Amino acid sequence: MGNTASQFFRMARWFRAEHGLSLLSVIVASIVLGLALSCGGGGNSATSTVNGTNAANVGTNGTSGTTAPSNLFYPEVITAMVGQAITADIPTVTGTVSSYTVNPALPAGLNLNSSNGVISGSPTAVTPTATYTVTAANSSGSTTASVTITVNKALSSLLKLGHDTPIQRLRFVNSRVLSQGYHGHWVLSDYDSGAILANGDQGWPPAVPCCYGGGQFVGQTVWPVDMAGATLVIGIENGLEVRSSSDGHLLATIVFPGLNSYGGVPPTAAGTTWWQLASDGSYVCAGSKLGLLVWAPTGEILVSRTGDYSVAQSFAAPGEVRVALGPAGQNVVETVSTADGTSYVSDSFSGQFHAWFLDGERFLTSLSNVVWIYSKAGVQQNVISLPTADEANSVIGQANWLWTYTTGPSLNVYSLGSSTPVVTYSTFFSATIIPSATTIAAFITSESSTAISVIDLSGASPSKVDYTLPIGGPTAYAATSSSQWIVGNFRGAVLDGASLSGAPRYLALGAAWSIAGATGRAAVSTASGTNFYFDPSVTTQEGTISFSSRKLALSSDGTVLAASSANGDIYNFDIDRTLNIYSLPSGALTNSFPYTANTSPWLFDFSLSASGTLLGQVLATETSLGTSYTRQVTATTGGATIWSDQGQDRNNPILLSPDGTLIAVSNGTPSFLSATIIYKNGTLLTAVPGFAIGWIDNNRILVNSYTSPANSSPPYTYSGCAIYDTTGAKIATPALPELHTIQTVTSDSVYSPELNSIFSLTTGQATWISPYNNKVGAVSGPYVVFEAASQVFVDSY
């Protein structure tokens, strides 16, 4: 090193001795102060501290400690459950901090790291919502930030769904599967047993870009995750959690304020910060405008280099980081040893750097339609000419193959030494192409089915096998080989591809589409196509029914279950619209009403009386004038129609009284013109103003009212509700919020699935409120069964 570098390290040693900081903090603080070699630009500091160290956080305007810290900020509002670890809440701060303190003391089981300010742990007791003040201080002064924390009671879990949002990423390493959902929920599973080993929630990045395109789930919407070898890494705001892939236990928390966790996706904007996990899991590296950092899985710093690595395209190989487009230059590859930080630079290459091969052993450059192939050390191995510049710009390499996917659309596979495709697959119109291991997956979706083609690149020539998936809307794929692969879909299900020769096996059940409740029994339908039923009082699974059901309904005694198939779900391209009736607890099919999508009439909606004897069906028929609807009521056993009506505005549910003798229907959309018509045994009985929500009992119905104020959007506003009896008389006007569906709990209370709350019909106030938002739920005896946090919970009210 030159004189400047030697001077830097002498000053760094003095600074460390004077202030008691870690060497990494000294390096970073010195860089920010201008004591180190110039690394150009501004941007985010490359500060990184590890749980348990004495390193200080240095913000974008950090100082050596002669100025009081400022701008302390915690990104999370912590809502926790007893016994479940929280995601580390990592603060940002401007300036150097000597210590962090908090007042009042954090809830039992949660801890504040006095060196880096990270809040982590597993709460052990219920704690009401409270605000805690964290103080960051040094010898010159202090700054504070508020953190809001709530600890809710632990709940019994009826069913672990794995995920309830679209699967964004899958990693498949040996016998471990790492899956990540759209909202940042991650799950580590054992492939062989299917058991969930660990899970957690990352939270959302500060800015979330649009995530839909071409009918598929795309885009950078949550902090990435990755897994390789014995290590998995979970991106969180301002840092990373490094965990063991064997069981998911935490190895280290890397504190890195300003980290944009692109996790293997090279950044495209100057000034960004990226991270990658080594392909063998032996280290984690990160690059920014200030330098390159390499950590061991335990959090120990292995390498710290200065330079602008913010837009580098790197490959984290065992023992070395291979860097293109880094500070060494635009037409060379710098290889940095993770053992001692030394590096060497390749000879210059031709063209513009395009991409690393997926295994990192080669890289591609291009210029117009010419593509060069180089070894990892920058030695040219071949140059080929592709038909167009567009194809050259889309080329991907793996092992001994290149491939391109063009809008033709066709997937062209090339050997490394040929400009002519070895094979062309031309049936992939609007396909999603995902490579993994030595395979390429292509999802092809139609209205009648979803197929996946798995192309094997491990042999002397490519080979393809086509499969039909039992689930629709695939979004993610991972493989260890062409015979062992998994696929995740838009509804959170993760399917084991090797099981398709028999009964499909799922590593994640996916979203709970519907939950129905009755005395002593609850039923749950999942996106994987399996329905589960339980006794909530003992959280015992009584049985399962294999039938892809979008909606469930139970009789009040829990002995009759009605289930309709996918019911028009646009991400489950299933033409079956069958409505089945089952007897519980045996699960025996007692009747079936077969319907097929796009074949008139087809099932649009259904309802079941609490007695389990009557069935209301809304059927859709396509006409030249649009869709016309027929509503009809029959016995669950079939037979003659008891009541029916027809029209283009007849698509609202049929509300059946508990004993099935009364029918209430509303037409059109809720508005100030809405009316509800009531029939008894199929004969007109009366009509009341408002839009019907549900029967409370065999004599009372709850109806919403709306007004239409000028210039309002939408053109109606909820103005209250009323309870009417079967003579049409208004008997009460409870001060309820706007409810859209209800389930009767007692003669004076109803449950709202959308609000996950129970309301008094006398006062209109909530008598039970869950702290967890849910998508679906139902009351089962003295319990509420609902979906939250990718599980189905049971809670007493």
Image (cartoon, rainbow, N blue to C red):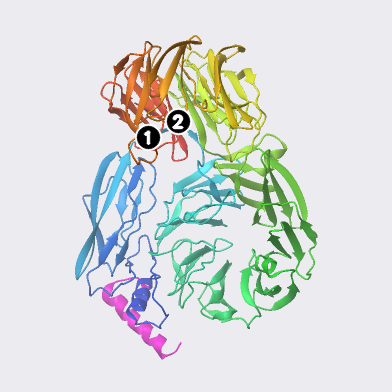
Q: What's the CA distance linking mark 2 and mark 1? A: 10 Å
Q: Is residue 290 or residue 284 the one in the foreground?
A: 290
Disc 2: which residue: 669
| Type of amino acid under label 1 | Tyr
Q: Position of residue 164 (x, y in %)?
A: 50, 41
Residue at figure coordinates x 34%, y 82% from the top left: 35
Q: Quadrant of residue 720?
A: top left
Residue at figure coordinates x 74%, y 61% from the top left: 412
Q: Position of residue 139 (x, y in %)?
A: 20, 70
| Type of amino acid under label 2 | Thr
Which mark sits nearer the N-terminus, 2 or 1? 2
Which quarter shows the C terminus?
top left
Q: Is residue 230 visible?
A: no
Q: Is residue 77 or residue 117 the one in the foreground?
A: 77
State left or right for residue 576 relative to residue 272.
right
Q: Which segment did they paint magenta?
A: 1-23
Q: Position of residue 604 (x, y in %)?
A: 57, 28
State left or right for residue 655 relative to residue 496.
left
State left or right for residue 709 relative to residue 101.
right
Disc 1: which residue: 716
Asked if the residue at tag 1 contacts the one at tag 2, i.e. Cβ–Cβ closer than 8 Å, the answer is yes
Q: Quadrant of residue 23?
A: bottom left
Q: Is residue 70 visible?
A: yes
Instruction: Decide: few, some or many residues near mark 2? Use Cα within 10 Å; few <14, some 14-19, many ≥20.
Output: some
Q: Position of residue 220 (x, y in %)?
A: 50, 57
With respect to residue 546, does 29 lie above or below? below
Q: Is residue 272 magenta?
A: no
Question: Does the magenta stretch mainly form a helix, a strand or a loop?
Answer: helix
Q: Is residue 63 or residue 280 the one in the foreground?
A: 63
Please tell me how many numbered marks the rendered image carries: 2
